[in-house]
Amino acid sequence: MKTNLTKLQKFACWVGIFAGIFFILRGVSLPSQALEIFLPKPVLPSHTPLLDKNQDTNLSPLPKEISSSFPSQPAPQKAEASLSLSPEKDKKIEKLIENLQAAKVSFDKKLCEQMEHINQDILYQLYEEDLPDNIIDEKKDEKFMHPCPKALKDLQILPDKKPAYFGPVPLIAIVIDDMGISPKRTAEIIDIKAPLTASFLTYGRNLETQIQKAKNSGHEIMLHVPMEAQTTKDVAPDVLTTRMSQQEISERLQKMLQKFPNINGINNHMGSKMTENEQKMAAVMEVLKQHRLFFLDSKTSAKSKAKEAALQYGVAYAQRHVFLDNLNDKNYILKQLQQMKSLAQKNGYAIAIGHPKTQTVLALKEWLPKNQDIQLVPLSHIVKILHPNFVQDNSLN
Ligand SMILES: [Zn+2]
């Protein structure tokens, strides 16, 4: 029986994967229930009730491949037909709903394990929006000035050519987003013993253990906050949206931060819609100010208003210059790393964002030891140079 169930689960998983590929290829967003199959959610989000017992039609909303893989459960339609409306039978319906909910929770856990084997490109299309390919050059940005103007004067550099930072060695920070979702790929990043900056989502499994391991490898920890995207659905459990009131945004973010007591900053996961809304971003910045945290703008939208909101609240702000792995291809990633290096040589520093993908891991392992003429530092190190008044270092707590 156990073997049969496992086979059925595997079969259902693959059906789900092929359905996912089909929808992606068609450019159609997946229905939220289909997405739920792929998403690693150990706890079901409270705002999406699985079954609504007040509506008979909602008795069988589970995807067919899930409900059909539990032969011991009565088929929902059959159960509905055989039960009339009486207090006793209402109880039976309630019990049935409970069983189905329990079944789906345990099934999701199995699927989470299977996710380790899902092609990573498909996985990333499911939980990351299309990332822009643009390289952001900070040179023209007058907000980023060297903290010691005299040093620049001595160098006789024209004002419009002033680099943002002019220390002895150009600095780079490499932030790895989406950490914690796939323990296997997160472990591959953690295996790189270098001062990378690991940005963890709030809903990974065994989060504390994964974070501790990353710290032991010399990584700085950040919170990767899901924010509403223009094109994709709100697939992340803890997402902040423009539909929320400022109060709600604040409460949600505070709750997320409770899981990350010793960090220095956050950045946005997706967020092309949310970051364009200055008012809603102000609610985010208010919380960051309170906790003395910096904001790294992932720049998923060119029209992001996060900087304006950060300035309004005096929150330390930095932005991503290069996305390393929009293509899961080692040679492409090596090229992006070189781009980051030339930006750092020109401007004094550069910030790149990558993801826990196998090709990224391979590229970093190859590239980092060969490029000792620039210095890889935790992101907060760069933020402190850009914002000398930002002296908080929570990670030492
Ligand atoms: Zn992300």
Image (cartoon, grey):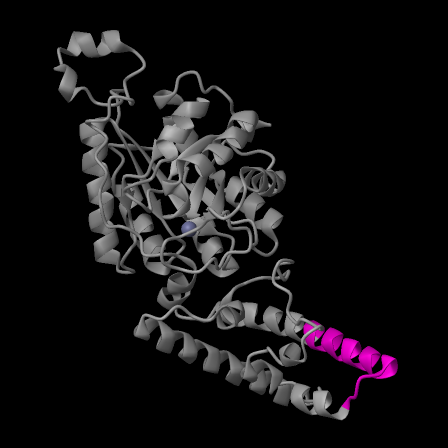
Q: How many marks?
A: 0
Question: Looking at this rendering, what residue extends furthest in the front direction?
Answer: 85
Q: Is residue 367 visible?
A: yes
**Is residue 144 toward the left or the right of residue 56 in the image?**
left
Query: Image check: 315 left or right of 153?
Result: right
Can you see residue 192?
no
Quadrant where the C terminus sits is: top right
Q: Residue at the spot x=18%, y=29% of the render? A: 346
Q: Quadrant of residue 21?
A: bottom left
Left or right: 72 as drawn, with respect to 120: right
Residue 254 coordinates in the image, percent (x, y):
60, 38
**In the image, is residue 204 above or below residue 157?**
below
Residue 302 image position (x, y, % from top left): 27, 42
Above or below residue 131? Residue 68 is: below
| Rendered residue at 51%/64% (across/down) | 39
Which residue appears at 36% of the width and 29% of the height?
A: 308
Q: Kindly report the secondary structure that dominates the magenta region of the rendered protein.
A: helix
Magenta span includes 95: yes
First to last magenta residue range:
83-102
Give the answer, above or below, for where 256 lies relative to 5. above
Residue 20 image position (x, y, % from top left): 41, 74
Of residue 154 and residue 14, the one placed in the foreground of this image is 14
Specify whether residue 146 is painted magenta: no
Between 332 and 368, the one lying in front of the other is 332
Q: Position of residue 2 (x, y in %)?
A: 67, 86
Of the 4 image quadrants, the one containing the N terminus is bottom right
Q: Residue furthest right?
A: 88
302 above or below 288? below
Q: Say which of 92 and 226 sits in front.
A: 92
Residue shown at the point (49%, 39%) measured from the top left: 222
